Image: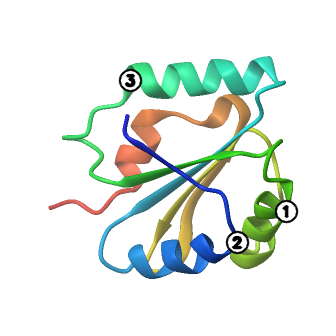
């Protein structure tokens, strides 16, 4: 997976705009949480760019707690960790946390070409 690091609140507005031309994924990861590590590992092992052409952002939420809270406020979602948001047309179209984060569900939520 080709992750783009998410480090600032300013990037959230950029992500919202980007999502109007291509789907964008945000993964909020806690380096202290074994469930988060398991989910990240499973996501990366199953990832297939040909099935999920998205731009993927990675947030280390322990280092950037303010950005994590800003995401929750900006997209009107409850903060969880680990958490995945699929953003399309400026809005979250799929929000999952913990072991509910699954690659096949991401693929299903993407527009069919």
Q: CA distance from mark 1 to mark 2?
A: 8 Å
- Residue at 58 percent of width and 80 percent of height: 13
Marks 1 & 2, CB-CB < 8 Å contact? yes
Q: CA distance from mark 2 to mark 3?
A: 29 Å
83 horizontally vs 113: left or right: right
18 horizontally vs 65: left or right: left
Q: Is residue 28 above or below residue 9?
A: above
- Residue at 78 percent of width and 17 percent of height: 34
Q: Is residue 35 above or below residue 9?
A: above
Residue 4 position, x and y percent, is 47, 50
Quarter of the figure with the C terminus: bottom left
Name the residue carrying label 2: 9
Name the residue carrying label 1: 66
Crowd class of label 1 (few under 14; some 14 to 19; many from 20; radius 10 Å): few
Quarter of the figure with the N terminus: top left
Name the residue carrying label 3: 46
State the SS at label 1.
Answer: helix
Give residue 66's quadrant in the image. Answer: bottom right
* Nearest-to-viewer mark from 3 and 1: 1
Q: Nearer the viewer, residue 46 or 69?
A: 69
- What coloring was used for the rendering? rainbow
Q: Is residue 97 above or below residue 21?
A: above
Q: Residue furthest left?
A: 113
99 horizontally vs 86: left or right: right
State the SS at label 3.
Answer: helix
Crowd class of label 3 (few under 14; some 14 to 19; many from 20; radius 10 Å): few
Q: CA distance from mark 3 to mark 1?
A: 30 Å
Residue 67 position, x and y percent, is 76, 62
């Amino acid at each position: 997976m080709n992750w783009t690091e998410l480090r600032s609140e300013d990037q959230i507005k950029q992500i919202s705009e980007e999502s109007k031309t291509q789907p964008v994924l945000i993964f909020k990861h806690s380096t202290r949480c074994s469930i988060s590590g398991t989910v990240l590992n499973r996501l990366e092992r199953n990832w297939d760019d040909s099935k999920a052409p998205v731009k993927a952002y990675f947030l280390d939420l322990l280092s950037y707690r303010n950005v994590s809270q800003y995401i929750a406020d900006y997209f009107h979602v409850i903060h969880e960790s680990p958490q995945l948001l699929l953003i399309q047309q400026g809005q979250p179209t799929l929000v999952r946390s913990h072991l509910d984060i699954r690659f096949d569900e991401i693929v299903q939520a993407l527009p069919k070409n």
